[in-house]
Amino acid sequence: MFKATVTVTLRKSILDPKGKAAEQALHQLGMNELKGVRIGKYIVMDVDTDSEAKARELVQNACSKLLANEVMEDFQISIERSTS
């Protein structure tokens, strides 16, 4: 069993209105040092397989087919052996 985490973010070339709004709000709170705020998704899932390569393949497939819009979003996958 493996634990997979996926971080999905808009591509740099895509405008991020939520990120821009959050950055402006942070600046209004006096945190002007914070710049380039981007908002994304963080996904965690258990993968029931004995092979890390198979786990990565399954998660990659899930991201490509459902969890991320590859036209507008990038994603990063992290796989760790589950302790439970």
Image: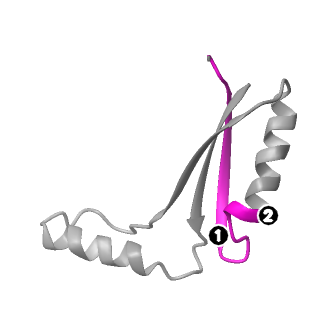
- Residue 76 part of the magenta-drawn span: yes
63 relative to 29, above or below: above
Q: Is residue 9 left or right of residue 60?
A: left
Q: CA distance from mark 1 to mark 2?
A: 13 Å
Residue 43: horizontal and vertical position, in percent?
57, 49
Question: At 62% from the left edge and 17% from the top edge, which residue is drawn?
Answer: 83
Residue 29: name its quadrant: bottom left
Q: In x, y percent, where is residue 84?
A: 62, 17
Residue 17: image quadrant is bottom left
Amino acid type shown at disc 2: Lys
Q: Which residue is mark 1?
A: 73
Q: In the rendered structure, which segment of residues is drawn in magenta?
A: 66-83
Q: Is residue 39 above or below residue 84?
A: below
Mark 2, Cα crowd under 10 Å, few <14 / some 14-19 / many 20+, is few
Which residue is drawn at the image coordinates 24% and 62% (left, top)?
33
Q: Circle 1 — which element?
A: strand
**Foreground of the two, 30 or 56:** 56
Q: Nearer the viewer, mark 1 or mark 2?
A: 2
Q: Which mark is residue 65?
A: 2
> Taking 8 as reference, is 62 left or right?
right
The amino acid at mark 1 is Glu
Q: How is the image coloured?
A: one colour
Q: Is residue 64 left or right of residue 44?
A: right
Where is residue 27? Give x, y as percent.
19, 71
Of labels 1 and 2, earlier in sequence is 2
**Label 1, residues with CA under 10 Å away: few <14, some 14-19, many ≥20:** some
